[in-house]
Image (tube, rainbow, N blue to C red):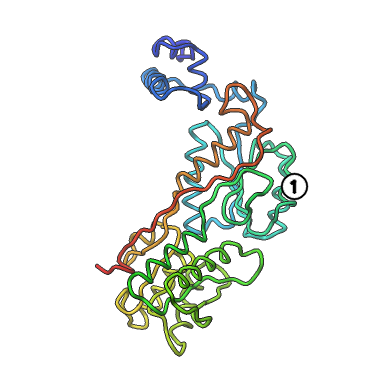
Amino acid sequence: MPPGLKDVAARAGVSIKTVSNVVNGYVHVSPETRARVQQAIDALGYIPNVAARQLRSGRSGVIALAVPELQSPYFAELAGLIVQAAERRSWTVLIDQTDGHADRERNLVAGLRRHAIDGLIFSPLALAGEELSTTGDTPMVLLGERIWHGPADHVAIDSTAAAMEATRHLAGLGRRRIAAIGAQSRPSAVTAHQRLAGYRAALAEAGLPEDPRLIAEVESFHRVDGAAAMAALLDGPEPPDAVFCFNDVLALGALRTLLERGLSVPGDVAIAGFDDIEDGRFSTPTLTTIAPDTAEIARLAVDLLAERLGEAKPEGDDSGTPPRELRVSYELKARESTLGR
């Protein structure tokens, strides 16, 4: 007969309720007790009866994650981290790709009540506050820079401050013609607007003039856009000696163009990106970038959903708490594309 909660409790020297709290991820358990219970679980090979727990709670044990695109290395990595965080609560994650289209985002939110989904983690690109208020009783956590002070819990970094730090790094190296790749004019492109604001603030701080010819607009944040924007900058009357790209994928495209033009990085042009994707750690040269704490974003998103579902607090539901705004840390990773080998 497989071991049960009673067996784990006896081995760990705690109550059955304490074992249940550990298994369900409740936060009000001391680290020492949690470790002792986990050791007993591992030693006995105890497997929680997820189906029974779901039947008692009325939950499906399934949450949804919706991101703009899975081909983006950043969102692919984030999705993997959210799946890992959800697995620690014995949750299954359904993943959807919206492509940033308003209709798809709207249909996703409107359709939540028709599906057996306990909660949604959502990175919107098109919808605004009112349209995100239609999830009914389904808890939602928002990610990214699109919505601040919206209708649901929100986890993000300060994108403007991070972009300012990346540009400040380039200016601190003595670069004087610092370009930006990633500007977008459409109102919904909040990420681009915030990173452009940080770029401009850093130029002003360094006493450098802003040259509109050094701000390259892109249709999307893909390699081909970064490559084309870099080519246009190099063909201008006064090419840049440094470039801040609004994500790492744009930076990798820009690096390719510089290689094809026979220019050295960082000798002729220094490059900095944003996101710290794995490709940038293995590119030649390795990529200087802003590294958000992606693991913390994933953990907080799942924890916030759990609190809304009443699973992180033994005393019950937390759904009456006003929406929370959580900012996650980031750091500049200075590598070969700005410092050289």
Quarter placement of the C terminus:
bottom left
| Residue shown at the point (64%, 38%) measured from the top left | 119
Residue placed under numbered mark 1 in the picture: 110
For this view, does 227 lie left or right of residue 127? left
Q: Residue extending furthest left? A: 341
Which sits in the foreground, 244 or 89?
244
Task: Examine the image and state in which quarter residue 115 appears.
Answer: top right
The answer to whether residue 78 is above or below residue 299 is: below
Task: Examine the image and state in which quarter residue 35 appears.
Answer: top left
Task: Name which residue type carries label 1.
Answer: Ala
Considering the numbered disc 1 on the image, is that residue within a helix, a strand or a loop? helix
Question: Residue 7: x percent and y percent?
Answer: 44, 11
Question: Residue 152: x percent and y percent?
Answer: 66, 44
The answer to whether residue 97 is above or below residue 43 is: below
Q: Residue extending furthest bottom? A: 237
Tell me how many marks there are. Answer: 1
For this view, does 105 lie left or right of residue 302? right
Question: Residue 268: x percent and y percent?
Answer: 32, 79
Q: Residues within 10 Å of mark 1 (few under 14, many from 20)?
A: some
For this view, does 331 lie left or right of residue 111? left
Question: Residue 8: x percent and y percent?
Answer: 43, 14
Which sits in the foreground, 170 or 237?
170
| Residue shown at the point (44%, 77%) measured from the top left | 208
